[in-house]
Image (cartoon, rainbow, N blue to C red):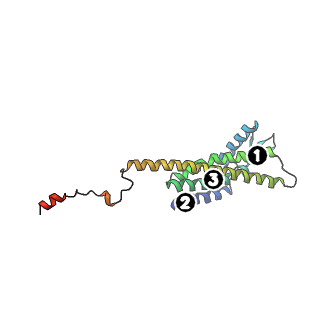
Amino acid sequence: MSKYLTVLLLFCLGKWWHQTATPEALRFLLYPTDAAVSAATGGSGVWRAGAGYYHAGPDILIDASCAGFNFLMIAFLMLAYVLIDRFDRWWAVPLALAIAWPVAVFANASRILTILLTGEGPGFISTGAWHQGQGVLVYFSVLVGVYFGVNYLANIKYDRLREERTLKGPILPVHADSASLHRREPAEPDALRSSTQ
């Protein structure tokens, strides 16, 4: 239980910190996101202090709202739950955060590239609603894919650890019960028992 509470506390602290985070503080997410977008589009973003990375070609600004920090926290919660549920070890908490970072960068870059590819969208939907809908679709798809992927790998690792621990222990018959584990003296033959009486 304490591990889950620690994860929840880290989530709340992260959300609290994010309320006043500047683009410079979020550069650990903005920089790799901009690098991924630049590699995919063939362009390059220019850093603007207090704003973010500006791409002149598509005329977009990857600012603090595009950093994907909220998705990072959600991915961290999900991954921490999966890893703690399988292994119940403290190392699952930092491991979940370490995995959540590249996942957040990938999801955020995918969302931006999807918006660039699809453009403004149909006329009966506002640009803001169109972009938000695309973000929800991309983020949800990445979360579902990562959940099943990590859950599958965690189950494989868990099964291997359980097999190793089983092999290191005593090898007993499957049908052996607790009574059969105690050593018993061999019974005396009936002929020998009658001769001693």
User: Nearer the N terminus, badge 3 or badge 1?
Assistant: 3
Residue 42 percent across, percent down from the top left? 75, 36
24 to the left or right of 82: right
Residue 65 has which mark? none
Binning the other alpha carbons within 10 Å of mark 3 as few (below 14), some (14 to 19) or many (20 upward) gives many
User: Nearer the N terminus, badge 2 or badge 1?
Assistant: 2
Residue that appears at 29% across and 58% down: 182
User: With respect to residue 181, does 43 lie above or below?
Assistant: above
Q: Residue furthest top?
A: 42
Q: CA gap, disc 3 to disc 2?
A: 14 Å
Residue that appears at 70% across and 40% down: 36
Residue 63 percent across, percent down from the top left? 74, 48
Asked which secondary structure carries label 2, the reply is helix
Q: Type of residue at label 2?
A: Tyr
User: Nearer the N terminus, badge 3 or badge 2?
Assistant: 2
From the image, tell me which residue sits under label 3.
75
Residue 4 has which mark? 2
Q: Type of residue at label 1?
A: Thr
Closest to the observer, 11 or 171: 171
Closest to the observer, 14 or 36: 36
From the image, tell me which residue sits under label 1.
114
Dot in front, 2 or 1: 1
Asked which secondary structure carries label 3, the reply is helix
Q: Type of residue at label 3?
A: Ala
Residue 25 percent across, percent down from the top left? 66, 49
Q: CA gap, disc 3 to disc 1?
A: 20 Å
Residue 51 visible in the picture: no
Location of residue 110 by image quarter: top right
